[in-house]
Image (cartoon, rainbow, N blue to C red):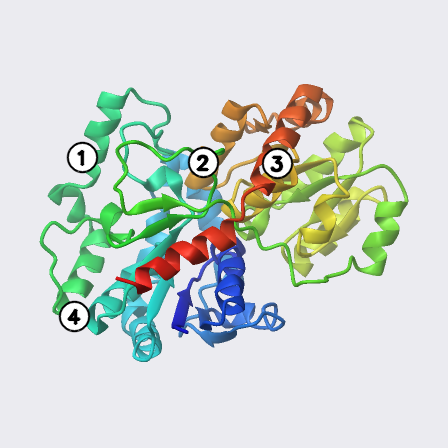
Amino acid sequence: MARVVLYAMGYRGDVLPYVPVARELARRGHQVRFVCPREFHGLLEPEPFGCVHSGLDLGPNLLEQHSDFVARWGTRLGGVMLPRLYFDKLTIPYLDRLFEVIDHELASADLLASHPFPYFVAGPAAERRGVPAVVLDVFPMLVPSRYTDLPVLGSLRPRISAAVWATARSRVVARVPTFAALRRFRERLGLDVNGWNFFDARLSQRLTIGLYSHWYQPRQPDWPESYQLAGFTPWLGPAGLAVPAEVETFLEAGDPPVLITLGTNAATAHPGTFVEAARALDALHARGLILTSNEAIAERTKRAVGDGHGVWPFLPLGPLLSRCRAVVHAGGHGTNAAALTAGLPSAITPVVSDQIWHARRIAELGIGVNIKRGRLHQGLSELLRDGSMHERAAALGQRLRTENGPKTAATLAESALAG
């Protein structure tokens, strides 16, 4: 059996979708080590693999400290300012530290499976050591294609979209300071930078595995052959996880609630959304089960919304989704995958650029509502009262549950071991 290194960091939605793949690889007998920020280690302790500190705690706690920047720039100009936070401030100054950790892990590894953005560090380490590397991708909107809408610009004609992507992959854009710093890092390691560009470098030329379903986003005809789809891989919590007693009491006390879970970035950038959503639900005579990401926001939200709603800082979604009627979330990949697979309609209030794309996508599929700013009440009214939306979401969920994303992703990853 092989020694496999999984590598991810960032928000919960950047790390937890990789857990089912790591679990499946471990179940098959591989020795799996998951390199991720320390704050995830306790949560993942029951899993059948070991966790290793990534060398930098680039996780929810650190990212919460920058919520003001996300609130200001997350959707403005399509989110094009966010690389200044995620790369310039939180990654590029620590490239050597990050590289040291992942390079050490890969010294005894047979395979690397990485999130696309940490791959800027892990990919070069794998390349230097001759370790096969695959990327597990959760951003279909960033795979260059003339047929895919760009989150920054929205829907474009294929010819225009192709021209935009050509520009994005050009030498001119590669000179943008953020991208140039990543290119220089690779060059400093003695690796080829000829033709290097940010959008291609976040993918593995050997094999990139999209962790989403073709029912949600079909594989585009101009994607490279090395890009394959596995299906969604939502992490719903440790096996056998029970609903906490106080949550069970709330669920049993009335009709199925609307789950409101905005994720780390949205919860800290726009915490008032929880209260706004609860008041909208009050007017619609519905209850909310609110997950606020941290204790401080939970306490403030409890005082503001009253006893008609349940408020907790964070709970794995697995035991909850079957007890809820719909989901309000920010559009992050992890929560979106969980809601889709459960067959629940969603209302998305996007905060950053990839979430804008998911909000548009669920509206296009007729399985949810893209909430425009200031129209939360109207959006929740549509979410709860449109029976056909619920039927379409349930039908899609049924299709998704016939897939096994973790199993397919593991099988595809194993194929990279064979050459």
Against 374, is 239 above or below? below
Q: Position of residue 51 (x, y in %)?
A: 50, 74
Total numbered badges shown on the rendered structure? 4
Residue at disc 3, secondary structure: helix
Q: Position of residue 326 (x, y in %)?
A: 69, 35
Kindly report the distance in space between the C-alpha atoms of the residues bearing marks 4 and 1.
27 Å
Q: Choose the circle earlier in sequence order: 4 or 1.
A: 1
Neighbourhood count class around disc 2 (C-alpha, 10 Å): few under 14, some 14–19, many 20 upward: some
Q: Choose the circle earlier in sequence order: 1 or 3.
A: 1
Q: Measuring 30% from the left and 53% from the top, which residue is drawn there?
A: 207
Look at discs 4 and 2 and give the one toward the viewer. 2
Residue at mark 1 = 166
Residue at disc 4, secondary structure: loop
Q: Choose the circle earlier in sequence order: 1 or 2.
A: 1
Q: Position of residue 367 (x, y in %)?
A: 59, 27
Residue at mark 3 = 397
Q: Choose the circle earlier in sequence order: 4 or 2.
A: 4
Look at discs 1 and 3 and give the one toward the viewer. 3
Of residues 45 and 274, which is closer to you in this image?
Answer: 45
Kindly report the distance in space between the C-alpha atoms of the residues bearing marks 1 and 3.
36 Å
Against 71, is 117 above or below? below
Residue at disc 1, secondary structure: helix
Neighbourhood count class around disc 1 (C-alpha, 10 Å): few under 14, some 14–19, many 20 upward: some
Dot 2 amino acid type: His
Residue at mark 2 = 214
Whether pointer 3 and pointer 4 mark residues with C-beta atoms closer than 8 Å, the reply is no
Dot 3 amino acid type: Gly
